[in-house]
Image (tube, rainbow, N blue to C red):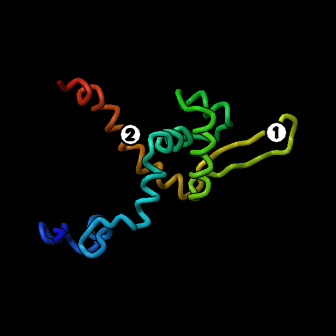
Amino acid sequence: MAVSIEDKAPTAPGSVLGDLLTDGMLASACPSRVVLDHVTSKWGVLVLVALSERTLRWGELRRLVEGISEKMLASTLRTLEADGLVLREATPSIPPRVDYSLTPLGRELADHLLPLMGWIVRHADAMLARP
């Protein structure tokens, strides 16, 4: 018999944890898991943070997010665009110009991610230095 979180500790009505529970479990079929996977992937977070201050072109993004391959950048941008977080604007010119920016939903998400990234930057060295 599975033990649910509700069996261990009650959650406050309207709490984030309470909103995530389905039948007392953090259910694997919850749509939030798909979005969480997209948004909190290493490259997804870094691309969202990179776009948090301004619109960037492909090459600018690739240089700013050091270590990301072209294939992974393309895949990440497609996913974030499909999720409604990133806007891709192609301008017909020679050479073609493509700009990437955050949508209002992406901006809202970035506003939540930036404090988390700040915390990570402040604590990463100490956490990684542990034996």
Q: Residues within 10 Å of mark 2 (few under 14, many from 20)?
A: some
Q: Position of residue 95 (x, y in %)?
A: 84, 34
Q: Position of residue 40 (x, y in %)?
A: 43, 48
- In the rendered image, the residue lying farthest to the front is 1
**Badge 1 amino acid:** Pro
Which disc, if any, is residue 116? none
Q: Residue at x 53, y 53 (%)?
A: 106
Q: Residue at x 67, y 36 (%)?
A: 58
Quadrant in which residue 20 is drawn: bottom left
**Badge 2 amino acid:** Met
Q: Residue at x 61, y 57 (%)?
A: 82
Quadrant in which residue 1 is drawn: bottom left
Which of these two is toward me, 75 or 40? 75
Q: Position of residue 70 (x, y in %)?
A: 63, 34
**Secondary element type, mark 2:** helix
Q: Is residue 10 left or right of residue 123?
A: left
**Secondary element type, mark 1:** loop
Q: Position of residue 49 (x, y in %)?
A: 49, 41
Residues at marks 1 and 2, CA–CA distance in whole angstroms: 33 Å
Q: To which residue does mark 1 refer?
A: 96
Q: Residue at x 32, y 67 (%)?
A: 27
Quadrant for the C terminus, please: top left
Q: Is residue 14 left or right of residue 88?
A: left
Q: Which tag, 1 or 2, sits closer to the chain's start? A: 1
Q: Is residue 72 left or right of residue 12?
A: right
Q: Residues within 10 Å of mark 1 (few under 14, many from 20)?
A: few
Q: To which residue does mark 2 refer?
A: 117
